[in-house]
Image (spheres, rainbow, N blue to C red):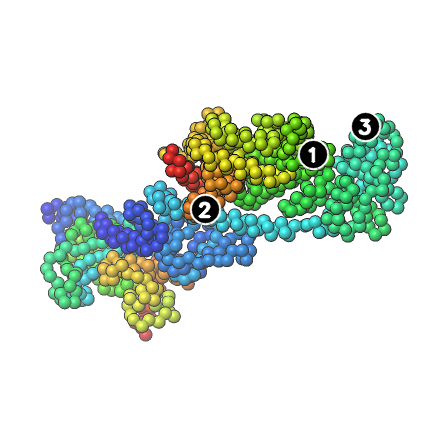
Amino acid sequence: MAWYSRLFGGQETTGPALTARQQQLLAAWRQLPDQDMRRSHYRCRYVVVDVETTGINVKTDRLCAIGALAVVNGQIDFKDAFHLVLEPAAPADDPAEHPEPVAGAPSIDALISFLHFVGKAPLLAYNVPFVAAMIERTLAENLGIDLGLPWIDLAWVMPDLFRDVEHTETGLDAWLNHFAITSIRRHHAVSDAYATAQLLQITIASGARKGFTTPASLLDLEKARRHMHQSG
Amino acid sequence: MSNSATEMLVSACIRFLQAHPPFDRMEAEALCFLAEHVTLAHYPKGARILSSEMGVARALYILQHGRVRVRSSGGASNADSAPSTLGPGQAFAIGALMAQHPASSVYVAREEVFCYELPVDDFFTLTQKSTVFNLFCSQHIAGLLKHSQQQLQLQFAQRAAEQRTMNSPLAAIVKREPVSVAPETSIRQVVALMADRHLGSMVIVDAGEQPLGIFTLSDVLKRIVLPGTSLEQPISSVMSDLPQTLPLAANAHDAALTMAMHGIRHVLAVDEGGRLRGVVSERDLFKLQGAGLRQIRHAIDAASSLEVLQHAREDVRQLSLTMLAEGVGGQEITQFISTLNDTVTRRIIELNLDRHDLYGIDWTWLSFGSEGRDEQTFTTDQDNGIVYICTDIMDREQTQLRFLDFARDVNADLDTCGFPLCKGNIMASNPSLCLTLEEWEEKFAQWVRTPEPQALLNATIFFDFRPLYGRFNLAHRMRISLFRQTNGNPLFLRMLAQNALSVSPPLGRIRDFVTGADREHPGTIDLKKYGVRLFTDAARVFALARQVEATNTVARIKRAGALMNISPEDVAASLEGFNFIQLLRLRHQHFEQEHGRAGDNLIRPDELNEIERRILKEAFRQARKLQARLKLDYQI
């Protein structure tokens, strides 16, 4: 059906072959209006994501699963959650370290559902460079699209908002321990996304008290901190 | 769309809930519904989660993480409502949700708090899906209600204590400038002035403001109208000379004492120079005593006329209305009304004894029915009788005639004082209720031996007898004899139980309540017939079977319950149910009377709020439990 998809596919028809239905859904997603980043945390929708991968190398490792949760008007609704497991194909290249996750050929339909789950909401993760790279590459390769949504990294925002917090550990675990947030199953994409979403709730409450009342302001905060670190 | 994420999150939520009551006992399906419909919200330290300013409660909150401080809002000082802390697994705002009211407390996050929140619509769906949860909410509310009643009673008691008492000086009681006239003023002028200013009395003073006499409204009849005195005569010709005076520093108690000693209704307050400063009437003293049960009793005991007792009766009514408005419990109010009604009745009997010589005869004034059970409400008529001892059979008829004369006067006076004559003629002036001890015993024995419908009906009225005045041991002997009869006739108790079971609690299978019982008043429930009576009838059988002497329903259930191995919790639950129904009745009667209607017992469940409907339902369930016990005991 390659000819068919070329007919309707528009400009980005370089890679994958998509059905007309899939093309339609992608077009519908593209036409969704951008979300207003200047609305209050408590009047907007965030999508918190986490991934499971075959390893930590962005270039060579592959995505195994995505867990995503919406935080709408500051609240988590369990029905507004998403789990995508990429179908297993080849065994992982490093089975000793990651026995469970297995990369595979992602289902086009599942990825499109993920896009629609996200909509045009700002995305939020802990350690964005890794999570975003994994997700965006998978989407580009399989759907031929550029996600083009703002990402907010709690790994940068939280140290700024909670300056007096000193950790003995590093990373996500440190924050979860500090706020005594218990994981359902650590390193499971949905579980980690859920835990991250709770951190986001704490973050926006604290941010709101310090004048960072919108997604855009968190983004600015993050940019400023990155800039400071790079120049310093 | 993938639901495995939702499944994972929901089952994690279920696992959390299962670790906490009442969710640990909740049905699997309902629990799943709950977990699927909550959202997780976060509140930073110090944030207000819920308070009355936020309006009608919109969600049920279940704490997932962190602690919440609860402080009762409203005018109450901190002293009577110590703040409490809620922790993970605890739910709040159930009462506000059920009543569809704003929360009465303020809930503040003490640290980072995560809360599961269930929207109000889902909350009500859940109460329907889960009997465990429903019960939890009802009990929670019953607890709240009890708590709030205790609070109110406490406040009430405090306020009563703060109020001016009989120790206040007359200077504090006398509010109005005294109106006085000179002795040569004509009767016509004085009476016109009294009518114009709505005065009950007029003081006659000399040029130096020294009181010379007093003239009261009751004097108009005796000294002017009846003798045909000319209205042009000076007031000094008909006034009472040398009125009783007290210094302004004397207290109300002194005034009451003076009135009692001299059989008068007015005392004049004078300053050091003996000049008139005010008039204190018996009525003022009543008003003053306002809230105090003991003081009203004193006043009644000291009352020298029916007029005073009439006022007293109105004071009792006013006070019980105030108590009702302040949220005092049904049991307390009915007991209060009964106690004061007893006092009024006793005083009326005493006043009549002055005119009827019953010296040398052992006798007792008995009360029956609700009065006998100490459960009078605002609308109550007379149910009374007399038992006496007649040593010589030849004197019997003569003695009875004397008692009937006496009883007729007492019945009439009671009527004057607001206890209407009994339509069914259950009164001491009825020759068949003014009997010797032996005759009463025979009457009771007759009913017990042949428990036909009329006899059973009589049992429900007369077996709740209680002595009110006279030789109480006569009543005790009647009770002993009654127990002997009922114990020897197991059939009677069985019939009485069956009679008690003839009316079922108006609980519907589909709808909450069955309201069609009275065709003339659709949509209503008669809380006397289908409410209170369910409890009193069951309690009577319990008491007679276990030889419990008490006639009061609460006392009967408590004492018989202990002998029947009913757990204290179950006893408390049924009493709460009974008291709630009584409270609804009182409130309804009050409302009806406020609107100038005769207080009936017909309430409309539709007009109750959600919380009251639920408690009423629970109350009826408690009645059903008592009935179930009767069925079990008598194999009916």
> Circle 2 sits on which residue?
B562
Q: Tell me if residue B432 comes above or below residue B620 in the rendering.
A: above
> Circle 3 sits on which residue?
B225
In primary-sequence order, the first of circles 1 and 2 is 1
Is the C-beta separation of discs 1 and 2 under 8 Å? no
In primary-sequence order, the first of circles 3 and 2 is 3
> Circle 1 sits on which residue?
B358
* Element type where label 2 sits in the image: helix
Which of pointers 3 and 1 indicates the residue nearer the eye?
1
Is the C-beta separation of discs 3 and 1 under 8 Å? no
- Pointer 3 local density, CA inside 10 Å: few below 14, some 14–19, many at least 20: few
- Pointer 1 local density, CA inside 10 Å: few below 14, some 14–19, many at least 20: some
Q: Residues at marks 3 and 1, common chain?
A: yes
Q: Residues at marks 3 and 2, common chain?
A: yes
Is residue B231 or residue B453 the one in the foreground? Answer: B453
Image quadrant containing the C terminus of chain B: top left
